[in-house]
């Protein structure tokens, strides 16, 4: 007999088999349809909104209880490209089981989380017929492309509301503790470029003519000093300061400089100067200022003695909630102007706002409490991740607290070759979602 878990593992196999790569706009409507069909079979009221290139799937499951609360579950069906293919130990588009592990592109990010949650709902409905809480899934198809159009989709569906939002995914840390995450940083990405003439020149001119390369390097140096400090006035002033609970929670995250330095093979830079506590504060509560790439001049084999007339850099700033892309770019413009670099051109490429939940919210405390009967060790509660996601989009449209946890492990290799999950983590997640549903009885 096929169990409910097997049925949805089969759906996971079918989902992994579709390369739904949003960056290449591949197979998105087909994947949305497959998920919509599974939700219909489960008895949901399903809408596939295909106003933009990646359809949004909305599936609502109603509780007969008067004044029932609503759980919103956010997932996405798009994945990152599988390349480089030669580094995969098996076909990325074929779900493969090896002992306790399942491998395949999207198995953790994010298709496996979706099927685990569908399993929990199906098992609950099988045991009890009626739900004690309304459940709404929103499954988008462009999360890996900065959730392009998610804002527009959500604005089209003002009927969506919730008391608690469960975020797409989450991992266990290297000690095997479940991470429960309540926020993420925002981001603004942009190019800064310099042009100093019509053509590259003979490099003998370098004594009298400034190259675009030196010009851009000097301009970038006015934005961040060698210790990592950002000399832009009031750069992080709008950043939401952590409260005492957030500070306490972050201090409890088992993470230290020595381990990080070793695990990443590092031995330089500001990292070596910070205490463990400073490092965590910096990582979770301060903005970053990063150069993603730099291009200028001759990069080919051998030597070419030219003075480049063009240089460009790609940069990103991770934003703490409260900071906005617009103000940050204005501050950077002002700083460049005031340090003599009015000629450098800034061009925005992408942006997203940051968000942090109140980790003392009763709905979130309930989730934390429920983990205690299911997981062998205490969870780690993180007010925010250091990365970026569309939590602010969802929270602005549906103002419920957001909490993230999932089926991943510390070596799940999201976005990389050999993406994997452990079946036991998958099963624990099913138990937790079922217990969460039951807690509304
Ligand atoms: Zn994801």
Image: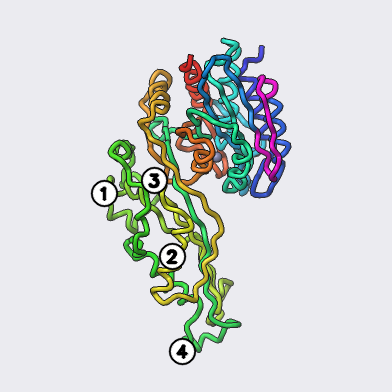
- Lower sequence index among marks 4 and 2: 4
Residue 424, image x, y percentages: 50, 24
Point out the frontmost of discs 4 and 2: 2
Mark 4 and mark 3 in contact (Cβ < 8 Å)?
no
- Which residue is the site of mark 3? 263
Q: CA distance from mark 3 to mark 4?
A: 46 Å
- 81 relative to 184 in the view: left or right: right
- Which residue is the site of mark 1? 275
Question: What crowding class fits label 4: few (fewer than 14 Cα within 10 Å), some (14-19), or many (20 or more)?
Answer: few
Residue 132, image x, y percentages: 53, 16
Q: Secondary structure at mark 4?
A: loop
Query: Which quadrant of the frame does ligand 1 lie within?
Result: top right
Q: CA distance from mark 4 to mark 1?
A: 45 Å
Point out the frontmost of discs 3 and 4: 4
Which contiguous range is marked in magenta? 40-57
- Lower sequence index among marks 3 and 1: 3
- Which residue is the site of mark 4? 208
Q: CA distance from mark 3 to mark 1?
A: 17 Å
């Amino acid at each position: 007999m096929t169990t409910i878990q097997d049925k949805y593992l089969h759906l996971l196999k079918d989902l992994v088999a579709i390369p739904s790569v949003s960056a290449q706009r591949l197979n998105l409507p087909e994947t949305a349809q497959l998920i919509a069909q599974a939700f219909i079979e489960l008895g949901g009221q399903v809408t596939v909104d295909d106003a933009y290139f990646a359809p949004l799937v909305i599936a609502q499951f109603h509780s007969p209880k008067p004044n029932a609360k609503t759980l919103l579950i956010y997932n996405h069906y798009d994945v990152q490209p599988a390349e480089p293919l030669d580094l995969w130990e098996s076909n990325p588009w074929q779900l493969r089981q090896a002992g306790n592990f399942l491998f395949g592109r999207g198995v953790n990010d994010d298709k496996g989380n979706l099927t685990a949650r569908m399993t929990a709902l199906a098992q609950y409905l099988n045991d009890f017929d009626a739900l004690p809480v309304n459940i709404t899934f929103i499954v988008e198809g462009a999360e890996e492309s900065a959730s392009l159009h998610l804002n527009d989709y959500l604005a089209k569906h003002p009927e969506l509301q919730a008391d608690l939002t469960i975020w797409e995914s989450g991992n266990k840390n290297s000690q095997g503790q479940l991470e429960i995450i309540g926020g993420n940083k925002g981001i603004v990405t942009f190019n800064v470029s310099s042009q100093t003439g019509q053509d590259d020149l003979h490099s003998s001119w370098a004594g009298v003519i400034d190259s675009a390369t030196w010009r851009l390097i000097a301009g970038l140096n006015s934005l961040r000093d060698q210790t990592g400090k950002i000399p832009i006035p009031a750069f992080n002033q709008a950043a939401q300061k952590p409260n005492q609970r957030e500070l306490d929670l972050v201090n409890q995250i088992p993470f230290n400089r020595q381990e990080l330095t070793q695990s990443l093979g590092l031995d330089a830079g500001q990292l070596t100067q910070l205490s463990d506590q400073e490092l965590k504060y910096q990582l979770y509560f301060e903005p970053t200022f990063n150069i993603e790439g730099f291009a200028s001049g001759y990069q080919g084999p051998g030597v070419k003695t030219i003075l480049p007339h063009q240089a460009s850099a790609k940069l990103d700033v991770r934003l703490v909630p409260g900071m906005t892309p617009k103000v940050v770019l204005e501050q950077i413009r002002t700083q460049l102007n005031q340090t003599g670099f009015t000629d450098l051109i800034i061009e925005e490429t992408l942006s997203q706002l940051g968000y942090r939940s109140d980790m003392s919210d009763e709905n979130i405390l309930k989730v934390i409490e429920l983990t205690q009967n299911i997981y062998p060790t205490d969870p780690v509660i993180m007010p925010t991740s250091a990365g970026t996601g569309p939590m602010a989009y969802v929270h602005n449209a549906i103002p419920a607290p957001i909490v993230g946890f999932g089926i991943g492990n510390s070596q799940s290799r999201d976005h990389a070759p050999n993406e994997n999950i452990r079946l036991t983590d998958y099963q624990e997640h099913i138990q937790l979602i079922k217990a969460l549903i039951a807690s509304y009885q």
